[in-house]
Image (spheres, rainbow, N blue to C red):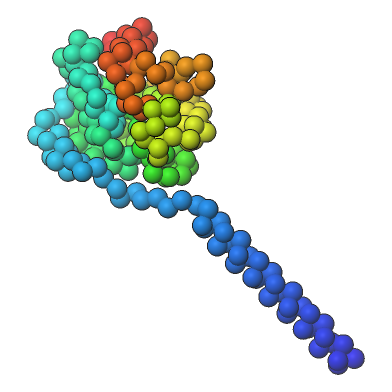
Amino acid sequence: MTALLLRLITLRNRAFAGLLLAATLIGAQTQAQTPAWDSTHRPTRYKELVARFNTEKITRKDFVFLGNSITAGTDWAKLLSLPNAVNRGISGDITFGVLERLNEVITGKPAKVFILIGINDISRNIPDSIILRNYKTIIGRIREGSRKTQIYFYTLLPVNSSFNKFKNHYGKDEHIQWLNDQIRQFHYKHVTVIDLYPHFLDADNHLRAELTMDGLHLKPEGYAVWAEILKKGSYLK
């Protein structure tokens, strides 16, 4: 009886050890398959531009365009014939960078804020759920600190891998589409979603080649499409 009991205990211990080993291997495999990401990355000119922004005070009449290089890539005041348009785009920025510099925008209590951010987060493998959380935090902080500011949140633009210039941004269409689906569900007071994405798609669901110089950034023709969306949608009144 004792021998049988010892044998059962031995078998149980071996089974437990096997399960533990399997769990360890699965955990290691999962960790290896999960790309590393870094919330602390800031573009080379980030500090310089933030310092400059802090000297260019935003006013209550201003329309602020907040984002990354796609926002930084045009003169919104000239494009829209809107003298009170203020560009707060920083090339290479991510949602964490926007959160870090958001107080400068909130303090000015602008009339409107137009936000396009997230494609660089995707390129840097920041999880979709974290990007979405940051979107909601951006909205929440603006609403709390500047209650009369109207927030316009854009869906992300598509990309076009045929240009073969920004490989880290390519092949991640499912992340763009998932985040856009989430953005379209934003139903908050003083928040309006502007769905840019479908206006820039070609027949293959890529960024229209005639609107981009490199598969990511826009040519003047792309900004013209954007401006028309804003004007026809009466978002600038």
The answer to whether residue 43 is left or right of residue 188 is left
User: Looking at the image, which residue sits at the far top?
Assistant: 232
User: Looking at the image, which residue sits at the far right?
Assistant: 1
Residue 57 in view in this figure: yes
Residue 190 in view in this figure: no
Q: Nearer the viewer, residue 216 or 14?
A: 216
Q: Nearer the viewer, residue 138 or 165?
A: 165
User: Looking at the image, which residue sits at the far bottom?
Assistant: 2
Where is residue 36 shown, x and y percent of the image?
42, 53
User: Looking at the image, which residue sits at the far left?
Assistant: 55
Where is residue 190 shown, x and y percent of the image?
36, 23
Q: Quadrant of residue 12?
A: bottom right
The answer to whether residue 74 is left or right of residue 54 is right
Residue 205 lies, with reference to residue 43, above or below; the image says above
Where is residue 201 shown, x and y percent of the image?
46, 18
Quarter of the picture holding the C terminus: top left
Residue name at image x 40 percent, y 50 percent: 37
Q: Quadrant of residue 102?
A: top left
Residue name at image x 35 percent, y 33 percent: 165
Q: Quadrant of residue 61?
A: top left
Where is residue 69 shown, x and y percent of the image?
27, 30
Residue name at image x 18 percent, y 40 percent: 45
Q: How many marks?
A: 0
Residue 146 lies, with reference to residue 211, above or below; the image says below
Residue name at image x 78 percent, y 83 percent: 9
Quarter of the picture holding the N terminus: bottom right
Q: Nearer the viewer, residue 234 or 39?
A: 39
